[in-house]
Image (tube, helix red, strand yellow):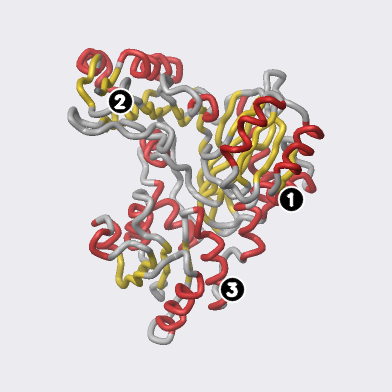
Amino acid sequence: MTVPNVVMLSPGFPLEMAYFTRALAEVGATVIGVGDQPVGVLPPEARAALAHYEHVSLADEDAVIAALRGLSRHARIDQVECLWEPYMVLAARIREELGLPGMTVAQTWPFRDKELMKQVLDAAGIRTPRHASTGTNAGIYAAAEQIGYPLIIKPIAGAGSADTYRVDSLAELETVLPMIGHVETVSVEEFIEAEEFTYDTICGAGDILYDNVSWYRPRPLQARSHEWISPQTVALRDLDRAELVAGIEMGHQVITALGFTAGFTHMEWYRKADGEVVFGEIGARPPGARTVDVMNYACDADLFRTWAAAVLTGRAEPVARPYNAASIFKRARGSGHIDRVEGLDRLLAEHGDSVCVLDLLPVGAHRRDWRATLISDGMIILRDPDLDRLVTIADRFGSELQLYAR
């Protein structure tokens, strides 16, 4: 069998990309990296996996395509992969320019443009929030009047909850407008009062080969609004729970409507108090903030390799799910450098068997800007087969473990 030559865009950034790059090589690909980072600063996992590296600005699409055209005269290129959202359209353009299989530009745009995404799903009969997109303040005012309060304003091509605001009144809207002035086009949406979940998949050859549901505690928008919160993401063991069935069914419908066939997807959805499920958004990428690690601990698996096998062969080994797993992100109290950590020894003595990862900033380190990174000043990953017990332990780490800075 011919060994495929696979181009990986941005093989070392963000950091988890290095593990996907390594997985491609482990599963049998010859990996060609293309990225902004000098080769010497690539994470060692990525650097060791690459057969060749092109150091070129990914923001310069023409330069990237020219570099790959030149390379293709000396080495066959079979496939292009990209798991970092800003450059997925670039990956699609490379496929079109070089005549390679995979998602086209037209197929990729609905995963990047939140308004176009919802238009496609509206046409498929999937319940989405009432929505509009605009690039002007006048358009935002008009959309707010039509949709009604409360509403959400966010970038149409954003990721996570950056530049995302809940607005409950005209007065709040006027306060928010200056904060989003740098965003070229925004989506204005109905705010859905509900619990928030994810539906994550790895697909190959048109089939869902692995899926995951995570539960956000609390909703990300609430977590990013209050510094004192220790946000949690809980990967759930039992996907046949009654409250998840409709959301998973909607996830299947979304993937079908968008024509997605191979790779990772990360979808967010809402479950209202009356049981109605509403689509949030979807990316053709894995979840961030080390959630793939959380999913790995829930499954005792290597989902980086599951993804690599899926995109290279269309198949993957079945993945069991013996645990629930949770990440808890910690934000230090105070400002400046980490001065002390309280509560950790007691929690480890009582619940150390549940701790998979303990990654806190050390004493003396300068605390991070909690608004700029969900991981903030550190994280803990826990797991337990029993969901109620896991949530109880996670809440103790959220409330009793404290970092202080001064």
Cα distance in 3D space between marks 2 and 1: 45 Å
Whether residue 142 can be seen here: yes
Q: Is residue 238 left or right of residue 40?
A: right
Q: Is residue 315 above or below residue 374?
A: below
Residue furthest to the bottom in view is: 73
Mark in the foreground, 3 or 2 = 2
For residue 288, which quarter of the picture?
Answer: top left
Looking at the image, is mark 3 or mark 1 earlier in the sequence? 3
Residue 96 marker = 3
Whether residue 295 can be seen here: no
Residue 239 on image: x %, y %: 55, 31
- Say what secondary structure mark 3 lies in: helix
Total labels drawn: 3
Q: Which amino acid type is marked by label 3?
A: Glu
Within 10 Å of disc 3 (Cα), the crowding (few <14, some 14-19, many 20+) is some
- Say what secondary structure mark 1 lies in: helix
Q: Is residue 371 left or right of residue 193?
A: left
Q: Is residue 88 above or below residue 351?
A: below
Q: Residue at x 77, y 38 (%)?
A: 143
Residue 389 on image: x %, y %: 40, 15
Q: Which amino acid type is marked by label 1?
A: Val
Q: Are marks 3 and 2 in contact (CB under 8 Å)?
A: no
Comparing 74 with 238, the one in front is 74
Q: Which amino acid type is marked by label 2?
A: Ser
The residue that label 2 is drawn on is 335
Q: Residue at x 66, y 23 (%)?
A: 193
Q: Is residue 206 above or below residue 234?
A: below
